[in-house]
Image (cartoon, rainbow, N blue to C red):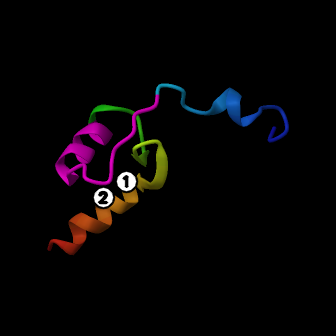
């Protein structure tokens, strides 16, 4: 099964990205309103990281 598909066949193509100064609230809204579990973090044209639902959960847990 693993050899039947390429990454380009199964990857998400309707991408959204965020910048490093996007607020946690904005990121939470994007993740909640879409079927994304991760968002690329792009500053200018440079990929600087990736923000995941796990990152959001860890942040929220730190607040309590």
* Residue ID for mark 2: 56
Q: Can you say which quadrant of the picture contains the N terminus? A: top right
Give the magenta range. 15-32
Judged left or right of residue 61, residue 1 is right
Of all residues, the one furthest to the right in this rendering is: 3
Judged left or right of residue 53, residue 4 is right
In the rendered image, the vertical position of residue 54 relative to residue 6, given as above or below: below
Q: Position of residue 55 (x, y in %)?
A: 36, 61
Q: Is residue 5 magenta?
A: no
Q: Are marks 2 and 1 in contact (CB under 8 Å)?
A: yes
Q: Position of residue 29 (x, y in %)?
A: 22, 40
Question: Regarding mark 1 in the picture, which secondary structure is present there?
Answer: helix
Q: Position of residue 62 (x, y in %)?
A: 22, 74
* Residue ID for mark 1: 53
Give the CA separation, mark 2 to mark 1. 5 Å
- The residue depicted at 28 percent of the width and 32 percent of the height is 33
Judged left or right of residue 6, residue 46 is left
Question: Regarding mark 2 in the picture, which secondary structure is present there?
Answer: helix
- The residue depicted at 26 percent of the width and 66 percent of the height is 59
Of all residues, the one furthest to the left in this rendering is: 64
In the rendered image, the vertical position of residue 38 relative to residue 49, given as above or below: above
- The residue depicted at 54 percent of the width and 26 percent of the height is 13
In the rendered image, the vertical position of residue 14 relative to residue 64, given as above or below: above
């Amino acid at each position: 099964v693993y050899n039947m598909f390429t990454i380009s066949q199964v990857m998400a193509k309707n991408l959204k990205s965020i910048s490093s100064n996007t607020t946690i609230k904005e990121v939470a809204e994007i993740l909640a309103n879409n079927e994304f579990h991760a968002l690329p973090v792009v500053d200018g044209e440079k990929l600087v990281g990736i923000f995941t639902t796990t990152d959001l959960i860890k942040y929220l847990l730190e607040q309590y």
